[in-house]
């Protein structure tokens, strides 16, 4: 399994990296400089890419090497994936040689055995890279390969060649602890502006060969095992949340995609909810907690602007819509400005430092340094009792806060919504430990309650945003007052009856008990 951290830098900052004192301090000898030419092959309909694999043949120093990478994950810039390679006589891949080294249970092995795949392989794109390699050894004895790649990715032929530049650092763990990758990256970041690299060269090449719009990344389903410890489950959950955050980084950085902002914010909220769920056993350092709050604020402002302009105001129709057309235009303009701010946030050195610091904390399991003996025992205990106690606690908190829900004032109702959201996230985190039927029944009722509380929160947030817009642009005072009154009427009309039924149905729903948890 290859474990590497990918970081992007501007070409003009490469000299600052080469001269960085850390490289001189840790390097074992002079850097090696290579000129590389890679050819990536796939079928015309990109079957390898569809199965999350990449096959290349590389020419370097007169030798040819083939490399197959498949599976794995990307979380906070950390790439983990399976890799198989070997020498070949020329520019053609040797599939028989690959077949002999790929594990029998790897899905990619069966795919490459299909005649239709083997016979259809052809060049898809190429890379031409100048690579500078430093072999680093940390004071703790960890061995890291630091690579600076600069060059170009090309696809097409004759006059239709398309290209994108490459300027990136790869820190690959050769021996030791993965946390050391982040120590090196954070040290480099102090002097060189860096961004997390979410896409491999293969992924960038495929996007060049077959252009496609950026797609928002939703949370992947978690697969937990009842034999896992509490700490192991926390690491799986945190990694899952970070995959969702980092998977939407490029969409947010593009500055326009509303769904990427939404999904990145959801990933961050899930992460913060998970940290709260395990806080009695491990505590995130205050500095990192503050940075997650900063990031959540930047994403939240963009998301709130999207909801106001694209949802709340979009529901106005007829005469009402005509009267507030200028207000709607101003709300859309404000949302676009918030998207620009969110894009600046996720492409900043501050964001890079936040994600690197968080990943370093996770990889090093740094919480153990301050854990009591009792906390360590609880971290090492099986997950099922912890999961059962957590869901019961979340349910009790929600039932307590939601008592007389239809009569609650907005601040108290907001606390109910937060409790419902935490209960929902916790249930989804532990879902694979439950009977699917019971789980579906419980989550459905919880979701209906969340939706009912959610649109009310959207209206309350909209009221504050409309008031702020009117203060910035006095000519919007009258239409903003009209809409605020209209929305307030919606909030009041039948509010009690609308909330009573979903609350009653949720309160009567039992927690899931069958499955691994029920047997623990």
Image (spheres, helix red, strand yellow):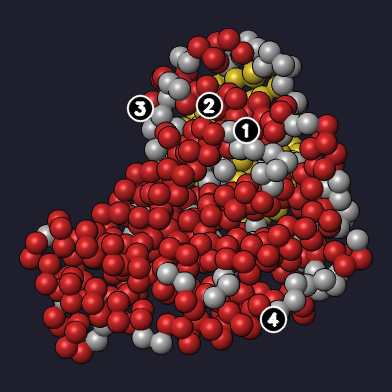
Q: Nearer the viewer, mark 1 or mark 4?
A: 4
Give the alpha-carbon distance from disc 1 to disc 2, as whole Å.
Answer: 9 Å
Locate the N terminus and report the quarter of the image it occupies. top right
Q: CA distance from mark 1 to mark 4?
A: 43 Å
Q: Is residue 191 above or below residue 40?
A: above
The residue pinned by badge 1 equals: 360
Q: Earlier in the sequence, mark 3 or mark 1?
A: 3
Give the residue number, with chain letter if any, for mark 2: 186
> Could you tell me which secondary element the residue under label 3 belongs to?
helix
Q: Name the foreground residue: 202 vs 315.
A: 315
Q: Are marks 1 and 2 in contact (CB under 8 Å)?
A: yes
- In the rendered structure, are the residues bearing label 3 and label 4 in contact, judged by CB atoms less than 8 Å apart? no
Q: Residue at x 50, y 12 (%)?
A: 21
Badge 3, how many Cα within 10 Å: few under 14, some, many 20+? few
Q: Position of residue 113 (x, y in %)?
A: 80, 62
Q: Nearer the viewer, residue 200 or 502?
A: 502
Please identify the quadrant where the C terminus is shown: bottom right
Snapshot quadrant of residue 478: bottom left
- Eye-nearest disc, 3 or 4: 4
Q: Which of the 4 image quarters holds residue 180?
A: top right
Is 18 drawn above or below residue 343 in the view shown? above
Q: Is residue 408 above or below residue 353?
A: below
Tag nearer the camera, 3 or 1: 1
Q: Which residue is mark 4?
A: 508
Mark 2 vs 4, N-terminal side: 2
Q: Residue at x 68, y 66 (%)?
A: 395
Q: CA distance from mark 3 to mark 2?
A: 20 Å
Q: Which mark is residue 12?
A: 3
Task: Specify which label sits upstream in the sequence, 3 or 2.
Answer: 3
């Amino acid at each position: 399994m290859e474990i590497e951290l990918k970081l992007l830098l501007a070409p003009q900052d490469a000299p600052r990296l080469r001269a960085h004192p850390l490289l001189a301090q840790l390097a074992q000898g002079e850097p090696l400089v290579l000129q590389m030419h890679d050819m990536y092959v796939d079928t015309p309909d990109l079957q390898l890419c569809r199965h999350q694999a990449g096959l290349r043949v590389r020419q370097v120093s007169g030798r040819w090497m083939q490399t197959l990478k498949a599976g794995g994950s990307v979380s906070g810039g950390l790439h983990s994936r399976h890799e198989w390679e070997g020498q070949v006589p020329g520019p053609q891949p040797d599939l028989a040689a690959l077949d002999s080294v790929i594990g029998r249970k790897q899905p990619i092995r069966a795919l490459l055995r299909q005649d239709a795949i083997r016979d259809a392989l052809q060049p898809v794109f190429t890379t031409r890279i100048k690579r500078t390699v430093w072999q680093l050894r940390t004071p703790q004895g960890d061995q890291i390969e630091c690579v600076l790649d600069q060059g170009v990715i090309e696809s097409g032929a004759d006059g239709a060649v398309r290209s994108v530049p490459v300027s990136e650092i790869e820190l690959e763990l050769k021996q030791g602890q993965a946390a050391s990758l982040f120590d090196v990256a954070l040290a480099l970041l102090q002097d060189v502006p860096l961004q997390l690299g979410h896409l491999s060269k293969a992924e960038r090449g495929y996007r060049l060969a077959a252009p496609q719009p950026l797609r928002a990344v939703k949370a992947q389903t978690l697969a937990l095992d009842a034999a896992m410890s509490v700490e192991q489950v926390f690491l799986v959950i945190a990694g899952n949340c970070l995959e969702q955050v980092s998977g939407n980084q490029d969409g947010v950085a593009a500055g326009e995609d509303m769904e990427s902002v939404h999904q990145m914010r959801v990933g961050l909220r899930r992460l913060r909810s998970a940290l709260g769920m395990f806080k009695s056993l491990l505590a995130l350092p205050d500095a990192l907690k503050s940075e997650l709050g900063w990031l959540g604020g930047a994403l939240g402002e963009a998301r709130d602007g999207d909801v106001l302009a694209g949802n709340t105001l979009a529901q106005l129709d007829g005469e009402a819509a005509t009267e507030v057309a200028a207000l709607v235009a101003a709300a859309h303009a404000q949302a676009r400005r918030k998207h620009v701010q969110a894009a600046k946030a996720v492409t900043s050195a501050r964001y890079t430092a936040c994600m690197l610091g968080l990943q370093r904390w996770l990889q090093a399991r740094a919480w153990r340094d301050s854990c009591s003996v009792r906390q360590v025992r609880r971290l090492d205990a099986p997950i099922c009792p912890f999961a059962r106690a957590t869901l019961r606690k979340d349910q009790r908190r929600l039932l307590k806060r939601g008592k007389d829900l239809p009569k609650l004032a907005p601040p108290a109702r907001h606390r109910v919504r937060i409790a419902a959201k935490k209960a929902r996230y916790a249930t989804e985190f532990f879902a694979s430990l439950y009977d699917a039927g019971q789980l579906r029944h419980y989550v459905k009722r919880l979701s209906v309650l969340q939706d009912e509380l959610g649109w009310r929160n959207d209206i309350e947030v909209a009221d504050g945003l409309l008031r702020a817009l009117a203060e910035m642009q006095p000519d919007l005072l009258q239409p903003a007052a009209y809409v605020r009154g209209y929305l307030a009427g919606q909030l009041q009309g039948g509010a009690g009856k609308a909330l009573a039924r979903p609350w009653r149905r949720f309160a009567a729903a039992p927690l899931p008990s069958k499955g691994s948890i029920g047997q623990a």
